[in-house]
Image: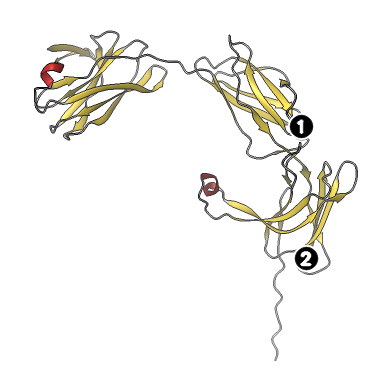
Amino acid sequence: MLLAVTAGGCSYGVALASATRSKAVPGLPHARTGPVTHVRGSSGLLTGTVNPEGHETTYYFQYGATVAYGSRTATGKAGSGTKAVKVGQLVSRLLDGYHYRLVASNAVGTKAGRDRIFKHKPAKLKFELFKPSAPTVIGTPVSISGVLTGVGNANHRIVLQGSAFPFLEAFSEVGVATVTDAFGRFAFHVGPLTRTTQFRVITTDTPRPVFSRILTERISVRVTFHVRPSGKRGFVRLYGTVTPPEVDARVLFQVQKPARPGRTKRTKERAFRWATQASTVAKHATRSLSRYSGIVKLRVAGLYRAWVVVGSKGPLVSGASRSLPLRAPAPRRHKRGH
């Protein structure tokens, strides 16, 4: 069978072997049309497999509005092996309902794969929330941001809902509604939180509301950190406050050290770790805060902080103070005798 194909204003005459004849012709390549992948707008990757059957083989894809196709891709090389190899060509202006197929050729002849029809399935609307990497200190404003993906993700009216610890109350709206931008992005700015809270985002202008996953915004205690001389060489007094009061909570004095490469992706990317040098406990001070204090020997210089350990089953989580650079005293020089 002879098929006329037009591409770029030029006509091509292609001899196509029928499926019945191809089985009886040794060395004729085998072509199998695959699915369309990596679809983005009106572009996509036409895929398939080609078995060269031991002869140097080339391939291309035909595509168009009907089985007459009308367009074809550039020619690719499939090698001269005897096993099927995966092939693909990226095309633009690929519309829903278009026909396409794979064609392979070598010195023995030309073989076309079966015709397939491209059915574009628009991506459903879906929320992606950006998870904070660290807890938010109590009393600090919170931002909940993300993106709405899928076809028609721009200019959707959305609301933020929240449920505070212990997460027993129903979700209720927080702040004011907003609209996704031209790229589906959005951000909500929430006032200071006093306890860990769960959030979710919902569309309000779609026939069926689209819900995001639940995001837990962890709220930590506020820790201050100060240093002053202790009156003893090589020792300093580290002290501060914890808000709200956490009486008898462990307070760890830590120094920043380079991290050893770990086995997981997270530990491989970590550049440093916090090593505990000493500890104390927080004591009652006032109704609004507790205090801690400890005399610590500085063995190494570096950035130091206080880490207050809080139980994980409460409204607040453990928190860290700011870090301060501290220098260890220089070793004493012994005088040489004469």
311, 197: nearer the viewer: 311
The image position of residue 187, as x and y in percent, is: 64, 25
Disc 1: which residue:
193
At 64% across and 35% down in the image, what residue appears? 132
Q: Quadrant of residue 329?
A: bottom right
Q: Say which amino acid is labelled 1.
A: Leu
Does residue 281 sit above or below 85 in this rendering? below
Q: Which mark is residue 235?
A: 2
Neighbourhood count class around disc 2 (C-alpha, 10 Å): few under 14, some 14–19, many 20 upward: some
Depicted 60 relative to depicted 297: above or below? above
From the top left corner, tell me how far across and down residue 109 is, in percent. Answer: 11, 23
Q: Secondary structure at mark 1?
A: loop
| Cα distance between the residues tagged 1 and 2 | 38 Å
Q: Nearer the viewer, residue 171 or 293?
A: 171
Quick check: can you spot residue 16? no
Q: Quadrant of residue 160?
A: top right
Q: Earlier in the sequence, mark 1 or mark 2?
A: 1
Residue 184 appears in view: yes
